[in-house]
Image: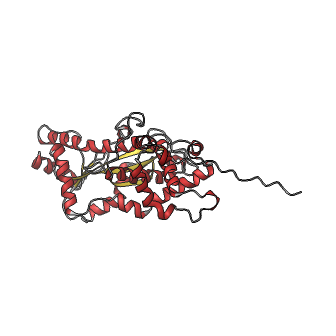
Amino acid sequence: MAATRIPRVFNERREVLHTLDDNELLQRYRFDRNSIVYICDLLEHDLSPVTHRSCAVSCVTKVLVTLRYLATGKFQMCNGDDHGLSQPTISRVIEQTLQSLTSQRMVRRFVTFPTQAQDIRRHQRRFYQTANFPGVTGVIDGTHVQIQAPSVNENEFINRHHYHSINTQIVIDSDDRIIDIVARWPGSTHDSRILTTSGLCRMFEGNQLPVSCHLLGDSGYPCRRWILTPFLRPLPGSQTNYNRSHKKTRNCVERGIGQLKRRFHVLHGEVRLSPQKACKVIIACAVLHNISKDRNVPMPGPSGSSGQPGQGRAQMQGLPAIAPTASGARYREQFAISFF
């Protein structure tokens, strides 16, 4: 006896862009209508269905589903109920959209370290206006993004706060844009190791920038000629003035990480994906963060915000200090005497 074939059931899909106004879209998807259309245009080549048979999911729906997930961190079944899709379809859609958002084409377009002299000097002038700290192109910090316990090398992902995470290195410029991000290291990895093995370090050590510039980092980073850290026991005078200016200038990285996590709530809770997919989530949020900056998309209002500013930094307090290299310590001391 032949088995009875169960007919496929297609749920009614919501026309979100036509039923919600810009404020409602901002609260639910973190972007207004024009910005969502802009993102769809960027990803259309990768996400447009090859056929319109069997109610194929459109590029717009794929983008909306993924933005909803990143904005809220909701379970995929709830996301499916919001958009009239099944949970397996939601899973495939999110994976496909994340793959497109984190492609080299997108990352190189939206997350780039300034390499033109005029861009570097513009950021240096703007950072100098903050607290009179000269020569700063970016500020660097790390933040932990919690993930579910992985099935492979589980112990490596336990950070010093005793939960599983991806330790993410972020560099912010004077416009609060992310100009460099490294999201591939397990939570037990120290910030200094992430930096010294990064392309950013190779770029500075290889003198690949057209003008002299510095990064500012906390005492968890090694002090070098291109990354300046605070004095652990500053002497009165120039060293104390240096530390005061250093701290005030570095505040923008705490603000930038806070904005990133408030805009994309998925980064606040536990990312219930494998480490590899969680890393894509982080990179995708960085790309979208910069798109929001380019298009002046406002932060969500009180009902859409999540957590408090600076939560990323709060997770990083208590890192053991890294002793500066001899050349780095001499350069920092001379720098403080010359400018403070």
Point out residue 248 in the picture as x, y percentages from the top left corner.
22, 40
Determine the residue positioned at 54% across, 57% down.
58
Is residue 300 shown above or below 62? Answer: above
Residue 6 seen: yes
Across and down, in percent, residue 110 comes to 35, 58
Q: In this rendering, would 293 be left or right of 136?
A: right
Q: Is residue 187 left or right of residue 204?
A: right
Residue at image location 26% in from the left, 52% down from the top:
138
Where residue 59 sits in the image (x, y, percent)? Answer: 51, 57
Q: Quadrant of residue 92?
A: bottom right
Judge whether 214 appears above or below 51 on screen. Answer: above
Q: Nearer the viewer, residue 258 or 227?
A: 258
Quadrant of the image containing the N terminus: bottom right
Horizontally, residue 234 falls left or right of residue 272, namely left
Q: Residue furthest front?
A: 18
Q: Position of residue 251 (x, y in %)?
A: 27, 41
Q: Nearer the viewer, residue 218 or 67?
A: 67
Left/right of residue 127 with respect to residue 103 in the rendered view: left
Quarter of the picture holding the C terminus: top left
Number of marks drawn: 0
**For residue 180, which quarter of the picture?**
bottom left
The scheme the figure's colours follow is secondary structure
Q: Quick check: can you spot residue 326?
A: no
Quadrant of residue 226 within the rendered picture: bottom left
